[in-house]
């Protein structure tokens, strides 16, 4: 293997912040930087300036020549070319050629991916999914984000948009969703769903919401997901019940995903997963009751994510490392024999970019060497 820089940079672009880290081959973060995400009304150039600023800050911390590639994880639809952000709800990007725009300013190989794909990859390589060949990640934030790692590679779909689990319909003619449809999963299992139900009880002056009402001084608009989790962990029965509802709906959707993907593990991330067993216990119960072929098949484990808010940065950096590797046909180092066996059986290689059109890899080499 040729000598190359030890680090790659991962950038996680969310609705409120741009977080960056310098990451080594073991998934350890050695330097950090962050900036506020520009408002969605600002031009794409302003967002790019922010990203470039974070990258320059990070390179300055570890020294020029120490970084071999930059991986971007963005909240939005990333095209199958891994170069274009097709649509980002929190940003001004519409068909934005992000990879080429950033390459022109940063001068390092750039990879672009969906943020949940990056998080899923990080949990599979270094977190709660270590040792499993097939992983499905479900991130419960304000909505639901998802990612799929099958046989050692990220499954992105034909058009790059796989894993949008939040908009699977779980209730016919159910609650209206921002996407325009009704009954989407994230309307029932997400931070927004948790807060909506709690606020309804507070606003209705329900006696079961006395504890929650006291926590927000009677003002339902001050209620947040973390406050409900805090109340539940302190023993408030209503908060426990509200989290259990979200957990049961989580189990419904996970049983559907098991029917489609048959993973060995479901990794549950996002802010709501901080509730731990208060969420996951009811999810497991419902999952077992609704699983197709229950009693006649192995059951996937349902576990909390381990890398927290760092998953997006670590995953984006690691995907960039693999993409920039001079010998992409080599498997990356794998933690367990079972993963190695699974990946060898499936593909002979661990290749997160497999499935793209032939020759689309190493674009910077073709064009710039
Ligand atoms: Zn929807």
Image (spheres, rainbow, N blue to C red):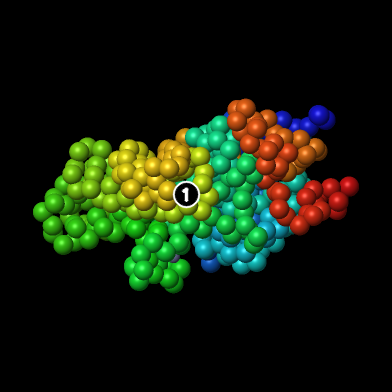
Residue extending farthest to the left is 207
Return the residue nearer the eye: 67 or 57.
67
Crowd rating for badge 1 (residues with CA inside 10 Å; few <14, some 14–19, many 20+): some
Count of numbered marks:
1
Q: Position of residue 300 (x, y in %)?
A: 46, 40
In the picture as drawn, the residue positioned furthest to the front comes out as 296
Q: Quadrant location of ligand 1?
A: bottom left
Q: Residue at x 13, y 57 (%)?
A: 206
Identify the residue shown where x is 62% and y is 27%.
337
Residue 191, image x, y percentages: 36, 53
Q: Which residue is mark 1?
A: 258
Taking the view exactly as shown, the residue that stands out farthest to the right is 369
Task: Please indicate, yes or no, whether residue 204 appears anywhere in the rendered image.
Answer: yes
2 on left or right of 309: right
Q: Please tell me whether residue 223 is drawn above or below residue 70 in the rendered image.
A: below
Q: Is residue 205 left or right of residue 338?
A: left
Q: Nearer the viewer, residue 47 or 267?
A: 267
The answer to whether one can see residue 191 in this image is no
- Per the image, label 1 sits on a secondary structure element best described as helix
Quarter-wise, where is residue 349 in the image?
A: top right
Position of residue 234 measured from the top left corner of the image (x, y, whole percent): 22, 37
Return the residue nearer the eye: 165 or 44.
165
Q: Is residue 84 above or below residue 254?
A: below
Tell me: residue 246, above or below residue 43.
Answer: above
Q: Is residue 60 left or right of residue 3?
A: left
In the rendered image, residue 265, in percent from the top left (x then y), is placed at 48, 40
Query: Residue at coordinates 56% horizontally, 48% vertically from top-left?
Result: 148
Q: Quadrant of the N terminus?
A: top right
Specify the quadrant of the image occupied by residue 205.
bottom left
Residue at x-position 75% and y-position 52%: 103
Report if the beta carbon of the residue with label 1 is closer than 8 angstroms to ligand 1.
no
């Amino acid at each position: 293997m040729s000598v190359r820089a030890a680090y790659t940079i991962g950038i996680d672009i969310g609705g409120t912040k741009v977080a960056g880290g310098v990451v080594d081959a073991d998934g350890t973060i050695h330097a950090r930087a962050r900036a506020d995400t520009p408002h969605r009304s600002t031009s794409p150039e302003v967002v790019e300036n922010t990203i470039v600023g974070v990258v320059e800050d990070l390179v300055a911390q570890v020294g020029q020549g120490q970084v071999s590639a930059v991986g971007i994880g963005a909240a939005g639809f990333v095209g199958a070319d891994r170069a274009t952000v097709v649509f980002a709800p929190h940003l001004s990007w519409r068909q934005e050629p992000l990879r080429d725009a950033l390459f022109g300013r940063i001068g390092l190989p750039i990879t672009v991916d969906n943020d949940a794909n990056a998080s899923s990859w990080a949990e599979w390589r270094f977190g709660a999914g270590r040792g499993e060949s097939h992983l499905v990640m479900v991130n419960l934030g304000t909505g639901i984000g998802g990612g799929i790692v099958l046989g050692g590679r990220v499954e992105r779909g034909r058009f790059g948009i796989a894993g949008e689990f939040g908009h699977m319909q779980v209730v016919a003619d159910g609650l209206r969703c921002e996407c325009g449809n009704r009954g989407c999963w994230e309307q029932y299992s997400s931070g927004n769903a948790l807060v909506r139900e709690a606020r309804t009880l507070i606003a209705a002056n329900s006696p079961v919401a006395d504890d929650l009402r006291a926590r927000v001084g009677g003002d339902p608009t001050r209620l947040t997901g973390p406050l409900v989790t805090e109340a539940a962990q302190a023993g408030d029965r209503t908060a426990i019940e509200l989290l259990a509802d979200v957990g049961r709906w989580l189990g419904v959707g996970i049983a559907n995903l098991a029917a489609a993907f048959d993973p060995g593990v479901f990794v549950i991330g996002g802010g709501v997963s901080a509730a731990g067993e208060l969420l996951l216990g009811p999810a497991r119960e419902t999952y077992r009751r609704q699983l197709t072929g229950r009693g006649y098949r192995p059951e996937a484990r349902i576990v909390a994510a381990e890398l927290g808010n760092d998953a997006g940065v670590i995953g984006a950096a690691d995907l960039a490392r693999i993409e920039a590797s001079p010998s992409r046909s080599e498997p990356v180092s794998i933690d367990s024999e079972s993963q190695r066996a699974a990946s060898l059986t499936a593909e002979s290689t661990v290749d997160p970019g497999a499935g793209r059109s032939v020759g689309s890899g190493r674009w910077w080499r073709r064009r710039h060497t």
